[in-house]
Amino acid sequence: MAKKSVATLQTGSKRLTKAIKMVKSPKSGSYTFVESIMAPDATKEFFNKK
């Protein structure tokens, strides 16, 4: 089962979130990790898109 973990980073006046998700490759069937640093309100969109 793919787990998601979110860490909150704070740099100066900006508040950012680092999101990590596991994505299954359609060709080989193996899992890879996709990381992204974004605003906290954009994390839901990140985890919902495939």
Image (cartoon, rainbow, N blue to C red):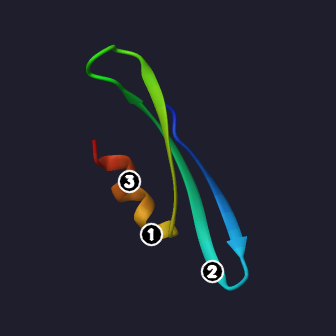
User: From where the camera sits, is residue 1 visible?
Assistant: no
Residue at 68%, 65% (x, y): give it.
9
Residue at 68%, 85% (x, y): give it.
13
**Residue picked out by circle 2:** 14
Q: Position of residue 16 (x, y in %)?
A: 59, 69
Q: Earlier in the sequence, mark 1 or mark 3?
A: 1
Q: Residue furthest front?
A: 27
**Residue picked out by circle 3:** 46
- Residues packed near mark 1 inside 10 Å, few (<14), some (14 to 19) or many (20 plus): few
**Residue picked out by circle 1:** 41
- Foreground: disc 2 or disc 1: 2
Within the image, what quadrant is residue 10 found in? bottom right
Q: Quadrant of the C terminus?
A: top left
Is residue 37 found left or right of 22 in the rendered image? Answer: right
Mark number, residue 5: none
Disc 1/disc 3 C-alpha distance (Å): 10 Å
